[in-house]
Image (cartoon, rainbow, N blue to C red):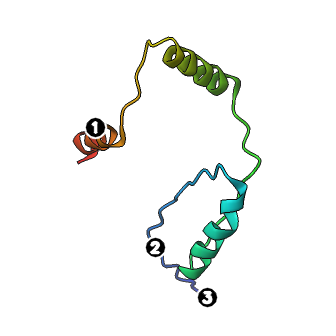
């Protein structure tokens, strides 16, 4: 009987949305230098509800119904929520 022992390591997933395609080679090089495994997904399709929500949010912003928070405010909210 052969017994294979697998060591399960903690794994964290990092998702990065690259807006400018010319930044992709630089990001790939950084990941390679750190010895990280990565996967590039360029085929993401937004659902109809995601597109609708984005367009509604954009329209609310343009009409002055919502405001944008600066990064410090967002960070404080996250720290309060997740400590």
Circles 2 and 3, Cβ within 8 Å, touching? The answer is no
Residue 26 in picture, x, y percent from top left: 64, 69
Of pointers 1 and 2, the one earlier in the residue sequence? 2
Q: Quadrant of residue 4?
A: bottom right
Report which residue position mark 2 lands on: 9
Under circle 1, the secondary element is: helix
Q: Is residue 82 left or right of residue 68?
A: left
Viewer-nearest residue: 71 or 48: 71
Find disc 3 in the rendering and name its residue.
2
Are discs 1 and 3 less than 8 Å apart at CB?
Answer: no
Q: Quadrant of residue 45?
A: top right
The answer to whether residue 81 is above or below residue 53 is: below
CA gap between label 1 and label 2 equals 30 Å
Give how far across and how far down residue 13 sits, in percent. Answer: 52, 59
Is 80 placed above or below 31 here?
above
- Disc 1 and disc 3: Cα gap in Å? 52 Å
Residue depth check, mark 1 versus mark 2: number of the one nearer the observer: 1
């Amino acid at each position: 009987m052969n017994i294979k022992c697998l060591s399960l390591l903690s794994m964290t997933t990092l998702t990065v949305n690259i807006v400018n395609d010319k930044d992709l080679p630089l990001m790939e090089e950084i990941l390679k230098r750190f010895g990280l495994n990565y996967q590039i997904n360029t085929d993401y399709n937004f659902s109809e509800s995601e597109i609708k929500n984005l367009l509604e949010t954009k329209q609310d912003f343009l009409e002055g119904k919502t405001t944008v928070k600066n990064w410090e405010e967002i960070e404080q909210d996250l720290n309060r929520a997740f400590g």
